Image: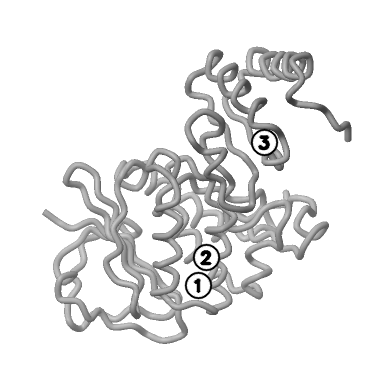
Amino acid sequence: MPKLNTSNPEVISYLLKAAGYWMKKAKIDGWRLDVCDEVSHVFWKKFRQYVKSINSDAIIIGEIYHQSSAFLRGDEIDGIMNYPLREAVLGFFVERSIDGMSFADKIVSKLMLYPDNINRSMLNLIDSHDTERFLTSCGGRVEQLKLAEVFQFTYIGIPYFYYGDEVGLDGGKDPGCRKCMIWEPDRQNTGLLEFYKRLIKIRKSNKALIYGGYRQISAAGLFVFERMLEGDRIVVFLNSSDDAMPLNSSDLFGKYTDLWIDKTITLGADTVFQPDTFKILKPAD
């Protein structure tokens, strides 16, 4: 790979012209920038100005593994691949190395690092071309993968999943995580594929999950949070444990529309969440 001086005006001009060519020729409307913390701030500032001048809605995501405030001040990249969040998700949903309270603390600390508009542009991933597949990390336990995906699709930011996750593709660390896609339908986990499709539909149909605020309701026992937008509320319940969990908070009792099954249900003192289960609920009028 060539080593370029990305502070050199001629280099900058050459690379910006390449970016502009593909944006105009192929209508590219977003960029994922590999290890962008190894490229100068001077370049990324000019890159952003140029890209946004062509398409103000084009998104710029950087691959940075660590805290990235220097790049996320609104004049370089829009967001990063959220590897720190991935580590917290692994610890809570798979390894069980942290409890709900610790998971909530990690989430809040990450939200406090950046402005709200940056948090909404984070590419929230659970695996990638550089990591072990999440399903492999789970030891093949699809229910743990599903819980992590429910969190991904209902949390602040952009839910990102790696090709093949949606049909049960597994794989260890590189090169195992980059193995070929399963194209034959009879080898795919079609039930898992339908699960992803349902999650996508629920997110697209409920603007609170895209644009809403975030509030933690409970983290001891059941992990419960809500997303809110202009009076619209969606409450998410996750039981990431091997034990059944009762609903102990009377504040959460009442009627809801269960967005997963599209039916009205009632939560009360006798409500119990089985291990590795979830609910995405909208309070009934």
Q: Secondary structure at mark 2?
A: helix
Give the label, 3 or 2, closer to the camera.
3
Q: Assign a secondary structure to mark 3.
A: strand
Name the residue carrying label 3. Answer: 33
Q: Is 190 left or right of 227, judged from the image as shown? A: right
Query: Amino acid under label 1?
Result: Phe
- Of residues 266 and 108, the one drawn nearer to the viewer in this rendering: 108
Left or right of residue 80, residue 218 in this image: left
Q: Earlier in the sequence, mark 3 or mark 2?
A: 3
Q: Label 2 is placed on what type of residue? A: Val
Coordinates of residue 276 in the picture (x, y in percent): 45, 75
Point out the tag, 1 or 3, that comes first from the N-terminus. Answer: 3
Q: Is residue 256 above or below residue 68?
A: below
Q: Secondary structure at mark 1?
A: helix
Q: Relative to 229, is 258 above or below?
A: below
Q: CA distance from mark 1 to mark 2?
A: 5 Å
* Position of residue 10 measured from the top left corner of the image (x, y, whole percent): 78, 14
Residue at 28%, 58% in the rendered image: 215
Q: Residue at x 35, y 80 (%)?
A: 221
Can you give x and y, in whole percent of width and height, for residue 73 in the image? 48, 35
Q: Which residue is mark 2?
A: 89
Q: Position of residue 143 (x, y in %)?
A: 52, 71
- Give the colour scheme shown: one colour
Name the amino acid type tagged 3: Leu
> What residue sits right under mark 1 in the picture?
92
Taking the spot 14% from the left edge, 68% from the top edge, the residue there is: 254
